[in-house]
Image (cartoon, grey):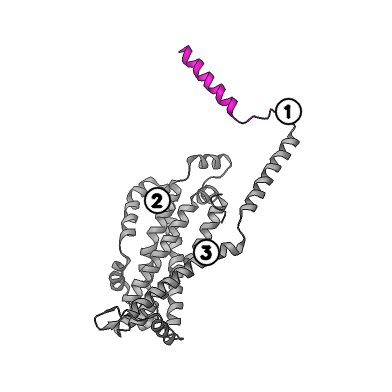
Amino acid sequence: MAEETATVTAVAAALDETAAPRIEPEAEDGHDKLAKLEAGLDALDAAAAKDRRPWWRILLGRVLPPIVALAIIVALWDLLVALHVHSGEIMLPGPGDVWDAVTTNWGPSRIGAAIWDSVYRAAIGFAASVAIGTVIGLLVARIAPLRAAVQPLLSGLQNLPSVAWVPIGIIWFGVTSATIYTVVLLGAVPSIAIGLIDGLDRVPPIYLRVGRNLGARGLDSVRFVLFPAALPGYVSGMKQGWAFAWRSLMAAELIAISPSLGPGVGQVMKFAQDNLDLSLAIGSIIIILIIGIGINQVFFAPLERRLLRTRGLSRS
């Protein structure tokens, strides 16, 4: 036992010798230590500023690749049209044909109004989903019996195709806005709640203990400790929730069609199907993609980058 103790002591001494030298309290006064600390932090800030790329390079790096990819896709699409790739008697329309179909049907009562109505419904439904999903996520994450009962149900609802709720919504509410919003909520709420639950589960317990020692209890603990620490998972859940909300809305608009509901992008696709207008159908799909990608790039992508920068995980 004595030999083992001596060995451990020797190893500890060797590690102390290889470690960075420590400044003894009596070697410098508090003013000198503070000055050195400030100098070190200034040096870190200067190095970080030096590593940052100019704004135009960042913009070029983010804008140019999608433009090149889009140009390649359009070129391949045009090539397929030139090779007369078709299904039965319906020829594959070219990019120009799709553009003409969209611009011809663009107007106050067609595609323009349909885009506005769809985006408005998606925004309202997503905002309600965030509010409901946040409350459910907090309760499930903090109450053990509720977690055991509800979390498997949330996972099952997340995997259920949103289009399955459309017939039930029509039976309950008829072909009304209530049906559309019900489908959107049932599609988005589970993802938002699960994202928040996962984020809260990854919060180290020591954060809560430190928060309690600093006086953060009850709602203050949720506001100042849990939510900031769980933000990465929460934002991921909201991002996925938006995707589910947008897909659910398109499914609902494609099936639940009524003049009282007003236009929608899904209704434009149904109109194209009924009239065998392949150019308009492809144009509608492109519009759906553009809106989905645009919301992600304008809202969620900057939010994620800011979140990473505040945690020192990204400088871009």
Gap between marks 1 and 2, in whole Å? 54 Å
Q: Is residue 10 magenta?
A: yes
Check the picture and name the quadrant holding the N terminus.
top left
- Of residue 204 and residue 31, the one placed in the foreground of this image is 31
Q: In the rendered structure, are the residues bearing label 3 and label 1 in contact, judged by CB atoms less than 8 Å apart?
A: no
> Within 10 angstroms of label 1, few (less than 14), some, or many (20 or more) residues?
few
> Within 10 angstroms of label 2, few (less than 14), some, or many (20 or more) residues?
many
- The residue that label 3 is drawn on is 62
Q: Amino acid at mark 2?
A: Val
- Of residue 177 and residue 294, the one placed in the foreground of this image is 294
Q: Which contiguous range is marked in magenta?
A: 1-26
Task: Tell me which numbered mark, 1 or 2, is placed earlier along the sequence.
Answer: 1
Measured from the top left, where is residue 226 in percent x and y? 50, 48
- The residue that label 1 is drawn on is 27
- The residue that label 2 is drawn on is 140
Q: Amino acid at mark 1?
A: Ala
Q: Where is 84 relative to 210, above or below?
A: below
Residue ranking furthest to the top: 2
Measured from the top left, where is residue 281 in percent x and y? 35, 79
Measured from the top left, where is residue 248 in percent x and y? 36, 68
Q: Identify the residue at horizontal 56%, vertical 39% (top origin).
A: 213
